[in-house]
Image (tube, rainbow, N blue to C red):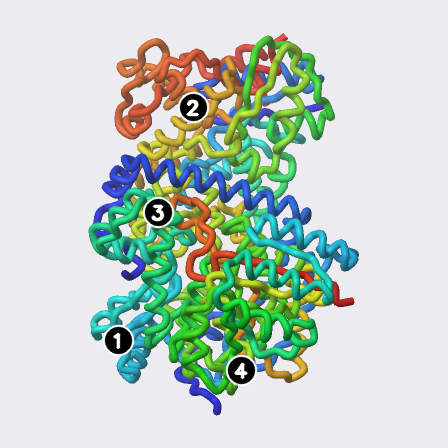
Amino acid sequence: MKVTLFATCLVDMFQGEVGKAVVEVLERLGCDIDFPENQICCGQPAYNSGYVNESKNAMKKMITAFEHAEYVVSPSGSCAYMFKEYPEVFKGDAIWEPKAQALADKTYEFTEFIVEVLQVEDVGAHLQGKATFHTSCHMTRLLGVKEAPIKLLSHVKGLQYVELPGKERCCGFGGTFSVKMGNISGEMVNEKVQNVEETEADILIGADAGCLINIGGRIERQGKPIKVMHIAEVLNCR
Amino acid sequence: MAMKTSDDRFNKRVTKELENTFMRGAVSSAQERFQTRRLQQADELGNWEEWRSHGEEIRQHVLANLDYYLYQLSENVANRGGHVYFAKTAQEATSYIQQIAQEKQAKKIVKSKSMVTEEINLNPALEQLGCEVIETDLGEYILQVDDHEPPSHIVVPALHKNKEQIRDVFKEKQGYDKTEKPEELALYVREKLRNEYLTADIGITGCNFAIAESGSITLVTNEGNADLVTALPKTQITVMGMERIVPTFEEMEVLVSLLTRSAVGQKLTSYITTLTGVKDEGDTDGPEEFHLVIVDNGRSDILGGEFQPILQCIRCAACVNACPVYRHVGGHTYGSIYSGPVGVVLSPLLGGYDDFKELPYASTLCGACTDACPVKIPLHQLIHRHRQVIVENEGKAPVSEKLLMKAFGLGASSPTLYKMATKMASPAMAPFTKDNKISNGPGPLKAWTEARDFPAPNKENFRSWFNSRTKGGSE
Amino acid sequence: MAGSIVNRESFLSNIAKQLGREPKTQLTKPVWQYQPQDRVLKDATKDELVAVLEQQCKNINTNMIVTTTANLATDLQKVVEQYGGRSVITWQDERYDHYGLSPLMHTKWPQEDIELYVWDETQPAENIRQAEKANIGITISEMTLAESGTAVLFSDKHKGRSVSFLPEKSIILIPKSTIVPRITQAARWISQKVQNGERIASCINFITGPSNSADIEMILIVGVHGPIKATYIVIEDQ
């Protein structure tokens, strides 16, 4: 199965390990991965802040970069969701709207792809530890992917899963919000870390780089002994 | 007060409210309670999504035919002896009501809770004439006594106050000498207000839902105050936002059912009352004279545009209770009588972008509000739309941000520029990096690093790894 | 006599203009796509509805008694005594007599120094004065909504609104035949009357238990402006 990887700019620049894990997990499941060089950024940072026109060129670049793909898979629910928004952004554009729709139709978030398309729930992963999971807002509410990550985690041998209190509550990242409204964002991530501590988990797992950099950054600052992992990294543990 | 509740700048309000530990505790536990109850009620019904869809179709149909239903409503109110005044502006509404107060030589006016009367700044207009205006909803009464403090939540206006503060307000302003126990405070207010109902000249209410087919207005309360406000004074004035209307009793009960579950997790509140015109012949309680004031105040400007869905709102505050930002900053931060997500969307539309341009950014676009809305208003999308308007039409975005975004636009559409930027990222950030993380970042990163560490850019980015791995590139 | 209507034409033309059309004078309400409300308790028997009502009363701080017409007087007396007797205000309603309450109300109570006042349309000021000082108000439900525990009362010259609001305690007599699943049935019934051109009461109250508020620290206080205590007496009248 040919899978085209949409790594996301955050993974590319800051979380290379996640990208590697995605590639290795998917290859192990029989996928043939390609990575279009021309992919840069889905445009969220500018788009979400209201700079729709500024983000259109970046979006067109992405549409073109993935035009050849059969399946586009991303380790970020919010970035995958951004692709789903492209048809609305280019609504009325005779050339770009159909292209955007074609891309939206073949884009999947990583866990969604494994469970819904590859129809696999047990990837043969093995990780000892007590873990909890933060459900990213865009992935859960906007993309509608709620069960796939939990199904996959439930089959990881040695992993004891504890539900995170307030798991659906936003961690305070929100892209530029974390910088524009830094103080409010700080309070939100602070509460999120407190929730994580309540579970007494050693590992916090998530499926979105933005959320993990945010929550992980707070955990680092507070010096808490909690390991922060992307679900791809967990699924890649043998 | 009018819609705007503060002259302080947004950032100052945020800082101040974040320090209010009691308020934050009160808000987060109220949120939890309301959310849990709302979800329990939704669960019990078993097909909540169908209810939401029904609520949405009713509201959308009414808005698309608003002129028709308002026509029908006004005809039916007049047929039952009521007077209908269509007020395009807040000024027109308050002038009309002042006129009635003067005609009646009204000294005392009792009011039940109404957001639209606050929006049009009604109380000061009546007080100007020398009328005593008394709020009878417990939360609103507390705020009124406390020098007209603005509400911080649509449904529980005094949420930010603890019982000790409430006791102190009554003690300082009215000589209250009992304890802070809620039952005692409530009993005190009950006794104090009893006589006011009985001696008031005019009763003023809002309107949860006007019913077009019969010319009725519906009031939804738990305290029973709205019923006393309308049963005892001889003149009743009801003020309604023009979009708060349904075709028949059938739609009224559906929306009330959605409202009470979404707002407070109840199947129905203690008192749901439909009032039609003046009292019937032979009735000895009920108003002899009834006025319905239908207020536009900027709502018609929203009709026909992309923000029209916000007019579907039934003022349940489910979005407020779901909002993770409201959770920390509380209602006063928004600087508007409408706070939380509904306030973020509505305030710039009714009050202009000048006073409310920061509000659309006080959101992570997490979508919890949209999920919670019983009539399916796409709140987070409307919030995003405001950002686009602010940037593109209003030109109110900060210059530095505009430049940054332009640079982003360039960098994100040019693989060459991107490659350069990523190559430079690690060395550029080197002065700020220690142990592979950045704890005190420059520029925009500074706001981030106040509370968190930021990862240092990978020395070898992912794509380099991928390319070297497959030996010869990808495509 | 008809009331006045001011500023309507310009107001409504403006709305129509915003909606991009001429003002509408004709409209048929659409057939709604969703009608979830009709299915609630659809197949419940009367007895099942009584059970639902009983359970709901527990949730709304309302005392509920089930009795027969034969035992009504005795059971009503018990509640009145529980509530401290003293003074009672009722509607002028021949049903009290039909239920065999006349001996209790007009003979026994005066003997026990329980003052009874019956709403009198010729005594407006006295009605209010009596309602204000009465300890107990007794009314009769026209339709009773099992799901929410709600009594529906219609005002008229013999049935003052204040009887259910001003006294500290409220007793509502509920003929079993009036019990329906939920507010949907009441709403449809009233709407049908309107469509038939019948005049509806100037005040229709849907009353669910005693008054309450959670405005102070979200702590539930039962008994604010309306009654502090409520009892429903269900009468098996079939």
Q: Which residue is mark 3?
A: B331
Q: Earlier in the sequence, mark 3 or mark 1?
A: 1
Q: Quadrant of the C terminus of chain A?
A: top right
Which residue is situated farthest in the bottom direction here? C1
Q: Residue at x 60, y 39 (%)?
A: A104
Q: Residue at x 53, y 71 (%)?
A: B274
Chain letter of mark 2 equals A
* Comparing labels 1 and 2, the label whose residue is closer to the camera: 1
Quadrant in the rendering for residue B461: top left
- For residue C157, the mark is 4
Q: Is residue B57 visible?
A: no
Q: Amino acid at mark 4?
A: Lys
Nearest the viewer among C21 and A140 is A140
Horizontal arrangement in the rendering, residue B104 relative to residue A165 (left or right): left
**Real-space CA distance between mark 3 and mark 4, rounded to the nearest whole angstrom:** 45 Å
Q: Quadrant of the N terminus of chain A?
A: top right
Q: Residue at x 40, y 47 (%)?
A: B340
Q: Amino acid at mark 1?
A: Lys
Residue at disc 3, secondary structure: helix
Nearest the viewer among A175 and B467 is A175
Mark 3 burial class by Cα count in 10 Å: few <14, some 14-19, many 20+: many
Residue B289, horizontal then vertical, whole percent:
41, 83
- For residue B172, the mark is none
**Real-space CA distance between mark 3 and mark 1, rounded to the nearest whole angstrom:** 33 Å
- Discs 1 and 2 lie in a common subunit: no
Residue at disc 4, secondary structure: loop
**Real-space CA distance between mark 4 and mark 1, rounded to the nearest whole angstrom:** 28 Å
**Real-space CA distance between mark 1 and mark 2, rounded to the nearest whole angstrom:** 54 Å
**Real-space CA distance between mark 4 and mark 2, rounded to the nearest whole angstrom:** 61 Å
Q: Which residue is mark 1?
A: B107
* Comparing labels 4 and 1, the label whose residue is closer to the camera: 4
